[in-house]
Image (spheres, rainbow, N blue to C red):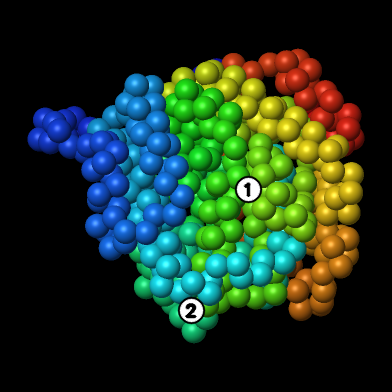
Amino acid sequence: MAAPPPHRPRLVRWLNRLGPRVAPRWPTLDPQDILATAARRSKSSERGDPGFEERLARIVEAVEREAELHWIGRVAVRESLVMGLESRFGLYRHRAAHPKIAGARIEKPVFIVGFPRTGTTILFNLFAQDPANRTPLGWEVQYPNPPPLPETYGCDRRIAQARKYFAQMEKMAPELPTIHEVGAELPQECMPILAQTLLSPQPGIVYNIPSYQAWVDQQSAAPAYTYHRHFLEHLQSRYMKDRWVLKSPVHLRTLDALLAEYPDARLIFTHRDPAKTIPSLASLIYTIRGIVTDAVDAEAVGREQLAWWADALDHAMEVREKHPDKSDQFADIGFEDLVADPVRAVRDVYERFEMPWSGGVEHRMRTFLADNPRGKHGAHQYELADFGLELGSIRKRFSDYCARYEVPLTG
C-alpha cells in the first residue's frame, strides 16, 4: 500500500502549468527582496536580533537546492517568509515605541510538550475553555500587530483575515482537518511563533530541506526562546489573564532552552505508543509537504520523522534526568487515560500544579467535548507500510522511552 498522491485542486494544477510561462522570474526567493518586502509591509526598521538574516539565507539556499517546489509552492514559501518577518519587524517596532513591554512578568507558564499525536491538541483545547487561561489564538499568532485589545478580542478585523488564510490551507489539503485542525479562533501552538526566528523545526517540517534542519539542530535555541518571550510580552501587553497555557511537541527537541528561558514553567508530558504516533505523524508531514511540492517521498518522510522525533524524545528524557529538582514541574499523562476521561486528566493536572478548579470550568470543558467529539472531521486513515515503517524497528528505537514511562504497547 502506498500513501495517496498530494491533493491538487484544478486551479492549482492550472496555475502550476501557467505560472512559469507568464511569470518565469517570479516569485523570487532572493533574501534581500524578501527582507525589503517585509520591511515595507511592516513599516519598520526594527528587527531585533540580526542573526535571523543568516538563517534566512540558509533557508532559501536549502529550499532552492532540495525542496523541489512547484510554482504555487514557490509563491507559498515566499509569502510565508515575508509574513513571518513582517510579524517580527512589526513586533519590534511596537516594542521600541512601548519600552515598558520589555521584561513584563510571565509567571509559571504551562507548556504542553508531549510527543505529536498523543492528545496534546485536545488538552490544549480543553485548557482554553478556562477563562483564567490565556492561549494564543490562530489569528493573533498569524497577525500579531498591533497587540490585541480586550474589547475587540472576539471581533478583531484580523479574525476574518485569518479565516481566509486557514481556509486556503484547507483547500490545498482537504484531509488536514482530519489529522490536525487549525483555525483563526482555535488555540495555536508555539511552532509558528518560533518560526519567525527562522531557528525552529517548522521550515524543515513544511519543506523537504534536510540540510537546513541538520544545521538548526546544531545551533543554540536560546535566541528562539528569547523571541518567544518577546512575542508573549507583546500579546499580553494589552490583554492578559491569570496564566499562559502554550503547546507544541517541538519543545521536546529544545526542552533545555525552554527551561532556561522559563525556569518556573510547568510542563505537561503526554505519552502514547510510538507505533501509533510515528505513522500518524508521518501522514501529517506528508500532507503538509504535499501543499508545496509534487515530489513527496512517503517512505523518506517516514524514516526522517522516526529519526528526528526519536532524538527529540531522547533529549527531553535527558533534560528531565539532569533536573531532578524540577520534577514537581512535570505532569505525565497517558493517552489511554486522556481518551477515557479527558476532563479528569485535566483536573489531575490542575491539582498537581495547584491551579484553581471550579464546577464552571468543568462544565465548559464537558460542553466543548460534547460539541467536538473525536473524529468530528472524519477518520484519519494511515498504515505503517504507507511510510515504509516497520513495527519492530519502532519498538526497538523507542524501547527505553516506553519502559521509562510505562507506555502501553497497543500494536
Q: Quadrant of residue 279?
A: top right
| Of residues 224 and 281, the one drawn nearer to the viewer in this rendering | 224
Q: Residues within 10 Å of mark 2 (few under 14, many from 20)?
A: some
Image location of residue 127, percent across then percent down: 70, 64
Residue labelled with disc 1: 248
Residue at image position (75%, 74%) is 361
In what element is the residue under mark 2? Answer: loop
Type of amino acid at the residue the image marks with label 2: Leu
- Asked whether the residues under the numbered discs 2 and 1 touch, taking CB atoms below 8 Å apart as contact, a structural biologist would say no
Residue at image position (88%, 32%) is 404
Type of amino acid at the residue the image marks with label 1: Ser
Image quadrant for the N terminus?
top right
Residue labelled with disc 2: 149
Image location of residue 135, percent across then percent down: 61, 64
**Image position of 276 with respect to 193: above or below:** above
**Image position of 320 with respect to 136: above or below:** above
The image's mark for residue 76 is: none
Q: Residues within 10 Å of mark 1 (few under 14, many from 20)?
A: many
In what element is the residue under mark 1? Answer: loop
Residues at marks 2 and 1, CA–CA distance in whole angstroms = 25 Å
**Image position of 228 with respect to 205: above or below:** below
Image location of residue 244, percent across then percent down: 66, 65
Does the image show residue 278? Answer: no
Horizontally, is 350 left or right of 364 in the view? Answer: right
| Of residues 42 and 142, the one drawn nearer to the viewer in this rendering | 42
Horizontally, is 70 left or right of 352 in the view? Answer: left
Q: Quadrant of residue 317?
A: top right
Which comes before the other along the chain, label 2 or label 1?
2
Residue at image position (36%, 34%) is 57
Horizontally, is 104 left or right of 143 in the view? Answer: right
